[in-house]
Amino acid sequence: MFMRIDHVGIACHDLEERIASFERIFELKVVSREVNEQQGVKEAMLHIADGQGGGSYIQLLEPLGPDTPVGKFLAKRGEGVHHVAFGVPDVVQAMEKIGDRGVRLLDATPRHGSLNSSIAFLHPKDVGGMLTELVQAAERHPESTSNTTNADT
Ligand code: CMX
Ligand code: CO
């Protein structure tokens, strides 16, 4: 079901400061920055490598406010690893299979994630205390537009 670790999400108080430190320490490069209001975060993706079906990244997350998933996490636990995201070929199919195995899905339908991916979260309490994200990466066709049905380019 899983093709790669898509990203590890890390909660921080100051996104720009954490980006600068990860660039300096790990020689990583930011490939996207986004404000995702629905998820309550300002975030950046730092590219590590290309894997099967998509890349793998570190995702740095700064909360948009205290009453957001990352804001609550920071208040309770402080900075650190917030979630692990696995790359899947088909997020809806993965959600169905995992949901059928008794795990609570935190999203009824996939949501918008970084780099135009489709994402869904699993309840950490049902999978060993690890907040888990499923990621279906966007198609790698730079010339195709997002709403077309897979033109053969
Ligand atoms: N990892 C592991 N456990 C976590 C956790 C995390 N990131 N966040 C919360 N928990 C645990 C808490 O410690 C708590 O456990 P206890 O009851 O033993 O104390 C329990 O889950 C409930 O936590 P809470 O603080 O009351 O928080 P909520 O239930 O309100 O929310 C969660 C927790 C996981 C349901 C919520 O954060 C969520 O829906 N997350 C998914 C969306 C998200 O995280 N978006 C940001 C990232 C966006 C992106 O990656 O693009
Ligand atoms: Co994530």
Image (spheres, rainbow, N blue to C red):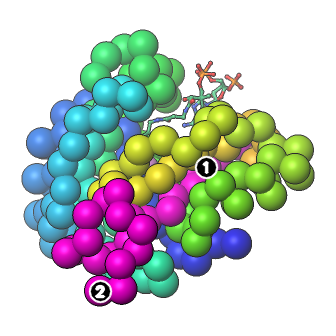
In this picture, is 95 found above or below 36?
below
Residue bearing mark 1:
132
Query: Residue drawn 60% across and 65% down?
Result: 90
Image quarter (top left, top right, bottom left or bottom right) of the C terminus: bottom left
Position of residue 20 in the picture relative to residue 153 (left or right): left
Could you tell me how many numbered marks the image carries? 2
Query: Residue drawn 32% across and 40% down?
Result: 61
Element carrying mark 1: strand
Residue 71: percent from the left, percent from the top? 39, 22
In this picture, is 26 found above or below 10?
below
Image quarter (top left, top right, bottom left or bottom right) of the N terminus: bottom right
Magenta span includes 128: no
How many neighbours does mark 2 have within 10 angstroms: few (below 14), some (14-19), or many (20 or more)? few
The boundaries of the magenta stretch are 129-153
Residue 153, numbered label: 2
How many neighbours does mark 1 have within 10 angstroms: few (below 14), some (14-19), or many (20 or more)? many
Query: Residue drawn 66% across and 35% down?
Result: 108
Element carrying mark 2: loop
Q: CA distance from mark 2 to mark 1?
A: 33 Å
User: Of the residues tagged 2 and 1, which is closer to the observer?
Assistant: 2
Residue type, numbered disc 1 = Thr
Residue type, numbered disc 2 = Thr
Q: Quadrant of residue 115?
A: bottom left
Position of residue 121 in the picture relative to residue 75 (left or right): right
Q: Residue furthest top?
A: 67
